[in-house]
């Protein structure tokens, strides 16, 4: 899977807007490429796009403690964290929409932290901001934040 700015190089004539929300940006890309919302290409490319966006903004190396610590700080986890295991444990208590987390870096708007999985689930489904499970399971950071939605 192409990561970061290279993702867009696969689509001639498409100019990315790094400050647009990920949903708006992918909608623009899909329109540019003529992908129907129900097509396999749309679904596959959306998963690739979101995984690439996450890697661009949060890193792809789940073995670096500093990447985990930065994610914990961004999600306002203030307790001192000195191991990846402690980071994972702290993140397991955080309920945040993964698409909104990407958008936090793209737009500068902090993601909403939900009090529980049910609130996150209701928001995620109502807004259609579902991060593809297969893409999330490939990445250590994403897997730590993955919650059962459907």
Image (tube, rainbow, N blue to C red):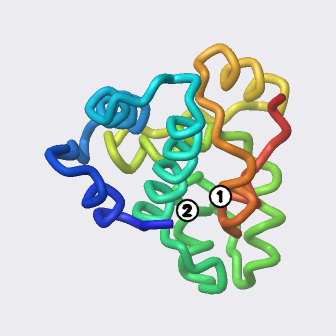
Residue 105 in the image, given as x and y percentages of width and height: 38, 50
- Residue lying at the far top of the rendered structure: 126
On screen, residue 75 versus residue 20, left or right, reads: right
Q: Residue at x 56, y 29 (%)?
A: 39
* 4 shown above or below 95: below
**Nearest the camera: 41 or 86?**
41
> Label 1 belongs to which residue?
77
Residue 27's disc is none
Number of marks present in the image shown? 2
**Nearest the camera: 41 or 83?**
41
* 3 shown above or below 18: below
**Nearest the camera: 69 or 131?**
131
Is there CB contact under 8 Å for labels 2 and 1?
A: yes
Quarter of image, res 150: top right
- At mark 2, the secondary structure is helix
> Label 2 belongs to which residue?
73
Residue 27 in the image, given as x and y percentages of width and height: 37, 28
- At mark 1, the secondary structure is loop
Q: Residue at x 57, y 80 (%)?
A: 61
* 23 shown above or below 94: above
- Mark 1 crowdedness (10 Å alpha carbons): few <14, some 14-19, many ≥20: some
- Mark 2 crowdedness (10 Å alpha carbons): few <14, some 14-19, many ≥20: some
Q: Residue at x 57, y 45 (%)?
A: 44
On screen, residue 70 versus residue 103, left or right, reads: right
Residue 106 in the image, given as x and y percentages of width and height: 34, 46
Quarter of image, res 71: bottom right
Q: Which residue is drawn at 55% across and 62% down?
A: 73
* 129 shown above or below 1: above
Residue 14 in the image, given as x and y percentages of width and height: 19, 44
Measure the alpha-carbon separation of dots 2 and 1. Answer: 5 Å
């Amino acid at each position: 899977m192409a990561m970061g700015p290279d993702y867009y190089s696969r689509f001639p004539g498409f100019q990315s807007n790094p400050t647009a929300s990920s949903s708006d940006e992918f909608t623009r890309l899909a329109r540019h490429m003529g992908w129907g919302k129900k097509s396999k290409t749309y679904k596959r490319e959306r998963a690739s796009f979101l995984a690439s966006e996450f890697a661009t903004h949060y890193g792809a190396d789940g073995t670096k403690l500093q990447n985990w610590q930065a994610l914990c700080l961004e999600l306002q986890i203030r307790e001192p964290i000195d191991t990846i295991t402690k980071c994972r444990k702290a993140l397991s208590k955080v309920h945040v929409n993964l698409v909104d987390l990407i958008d936090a870096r793209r737009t500068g708007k902090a993601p909403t932290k939900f009090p529980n999985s049910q609130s996150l689930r209701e928001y995620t489904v109502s807004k259609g901001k579902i991060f593809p499970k297969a893409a999330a399971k490939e990445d250590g950071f994403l897997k730590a934040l993955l919650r059962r939605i459907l």
